[in-house]
Amino acid sequence: MSKHVIAYLGLGANLGDPLDQLQQALALLHHSQGISIRQVSSLYETSPVGYLDQPNFYNLVAEIDTVLPPMQLLNMTQKVEQSLHRVRKERFGPRTMDVDILLYGQRIFNLPDLIIPHPRLLERAFALVPLHEVAGDLTLPTGEKIDQAVKALSNDQWIQKKTFTWQGR
């Protein structure tokens, strides 16, 4: 029997119908073998980072319970992206779906295809603010406290909380 791990996934979209795509992504994850969604943050509308000439993003964080090892979880998140027609044209570019593994228990991974905690987590309000909502008292495996990291964010990242109810419950 594989060990259960609490992991946190960041989901975001800004093409097509982002709200519907987020619902679909959560449903696909929830019905995946080895994954159970424990809770989902509110939805946050945010301005793009990096490549600015694109629509605003809609982001949320899902807390999951999984028995999948990290690379299998990565494969599953990429399958979800593909099923929602993710196309990787440019870094930080527009997308129908992005699913990132933010945290995997208290473990640290530095592999060619997978870095956990997510390497830009502490810089990104669109990931850190919804993560704080579902796990505000969490300490990262690298020692940073989520609540302190949110307070340290620069104010130049526009973020607005939106009403969103995950339909899977």
Image (tube, rainbow, N blue to C red):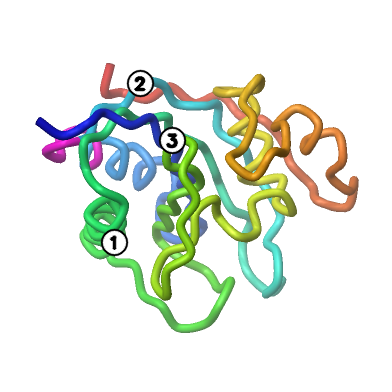
Q: What residue is disc 1 on? A: 78
The answer to which of 146 and 28 lies nearer the viewer is: 146
The answer to which of 54 and 30 lies nearer the viewer is: 30
45 w.r.t. 85: above or below: above
Residue 105: in magenta span:
no
Residue 110, disc: none
Q: What residue is disc 3 on? A: 105
Q: Secondary structure at mark 2?
A: strand
Find the distance from the CA under tag 3 to the CA under tag 2: 14 Å
Find the distance from the CA under tag 1 to the CA under tag 2: 20 Å
Q: Considering only order in the chain, which callout, 3 or 1, is on the residue closer to the N terminus?
A: 1
Q: Considering only order in the chain, which callout, 2 or 1, is on the residue closer to the N terminus?
A: 2
Answer whether labels 1 and 3 touch (C-beta < 8 Å). Answer: no
Q: Amino acid at mark 2?
A: Arg
11 w.r.t. 61: above or below: below
**Which quarter of the rendered picture does the N terminus lie within?**
top left
Q: Amino acid at mark 1?
A: Gln
The reply, left or right, for residue 133 in relation to residue 72 is right
Q: Residues within 10 Å of mark 1 (few under 14, many from 20)?
A: some
Q: Nearer the viewer, mark 1 or mark 3?
A: 3
Residue 19 at x, y = what percent? 43, 41
Question: Which secondary structure dominates the residues rendered in magenta?
Answer: loop
Residue 38, disc: 2
Q: Which residue is drawn at the image coordinates 49% and 54% (left, top)?
A: 116
117 w.r.t. 89: above or below: above
Q: Secondary structure at mark 3?
A: loop
Q: Nearer the viewer, mark 3 or mark 2?
A: 3
Residue 57 at x, y = what percent? 59, 53
Q: Quadrant of residue 36?
A: top left
Q: How many marks?
A: 3
Q: Which residue is drawn at the image coordinates 43% and 57% (left, top)?
A: 98
First to last magenta residue range:
29-34
